[in-house]
Amino acid sequence: MIYWEDISPGRTFETASITISREEILEFAAEFDPQPFHLNSQAADDSIFGGLCASGWHICALMMRLMADTFKREGLASMGSPGVPELRWRKPVFAEDTLKGTFKVSECRESKSNPAMGLMELEVAVCNQEDKTVIEMTSTMMVARK
Amino acid sequence: MNKTPYIRTRWFEDIPVGEFHVFGTHTFGEKEIIDFGNKYDPQPFHVDPELARDSAFRGLVASGWHICAIWMKMMVTYMERYATGVKDGRRNGAGVGFQDLRWIKPVRPGHTLTFTYEIVEKTDQVVRGKWGVIRSRNEAFNQYGELVFSFVIDILAERRPEGGEGTGAVIR
């Protein structure tokens, strides 16, 4: 396992990649975000996005999946997250886009409330197959101490 | 019944800072927590009740992104109930981003969250010629009245076009 003490600022993790299908976009939208530009091609063409695109929350969920799989692969002792100081949706994500993430540790600090864990600030970016950033986020992560 | 239209069905100029709505309630079931976790956030405390018991959460908890997705679902349901024109989609604005999102307390199976928003700011920024930015503070409270989730989101709203009258959509 990798614990809080094992990580210092500057450490960068690369996630695997994931390709999003039209069916997945429609399925997530039908359940959580049934707005026309996530469900209907014609309405989407007329919308601000210019085409059927994934819900922003779907992109967040996929980003989380990429990160959770990376925690597992690296043996990172994640204890969850207390929050996200900032997130920007930079570009829409369309069917058959392939997403890949990077997260860099920008700060490590002790937890005042829980001696069993430490905190890390992360700078996260998810890019598409053209290497354009679709999401940028700063987030806080709780990691177990030795 | 409250007939105030949802923010994206009015022109940017018609949306008042200070407007406050209680817009939805959702009870999280164990199965939906585990299903979401398996798909998007397969950490032990979101997918495995036994391993979750030994985690810092002392039991299964919903993924924070699941709470976000339910926030969106409540918001869309609310706007469909209170305004027509939403299904058209041309005037639905996109979310630009959010700040200061906090997952304050765990959400466990059987917990019921009530969601609120308040319009806190309108910025002068004009996006792609016709959109304004509306900033709202969103909160969710559990059945004990505890604040469990909060964030501030920026959403685009269409600015009133030259000569445009009335509201941006037909209100039922």
Image (cartoon, coloured by chain):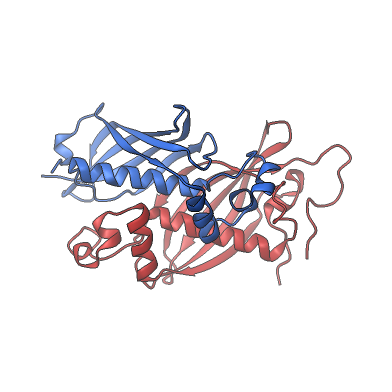
- In the rendered image of this protein, does residue B107 appear above or below residue B11? below
Quadrant location, the C terminus of chain A? top left
Residue B43 vs residue A41, the one in the foreground: A41
Chain coloured red here: B
What residue appears at the point 58 percent right and 48 percent down from the top-left corner?
A: B136
Quadrant of res B19:
bottom right
Quadrant of res A145:
top left
Report whether B150 appears left or right of B59: right
The outermost residue toward the left is A146
Residue B143 vs residue A80, the one in the foreground: A80
List x then y, in percent, for residue B122. 66, 41
Residue A72 vs residue B137, the one in the foreground: A72
List x then y, in percent, for residue B33. 37, 64
List x then y, in percent, for residue B12. 73, 44
Residue B14 in sight from this viewpoint? yes
What residue appears at the point 52 percent right and 48 percent down from the top-left corner?
A: A22
Residue B95 vs residue A53, the one in the foreground: A53
The outermost residue toward the right is B163
Question: Number of marks in the image?
Answer: 0
Chain coloured blue here: A
Residue A137 in sight from this viewpoint? no
Report whether B62 appears left or right of B74: left
Quadrant location, the N terminus of chain A? top left
List x then y, in percent, for residue B138. 53, 54
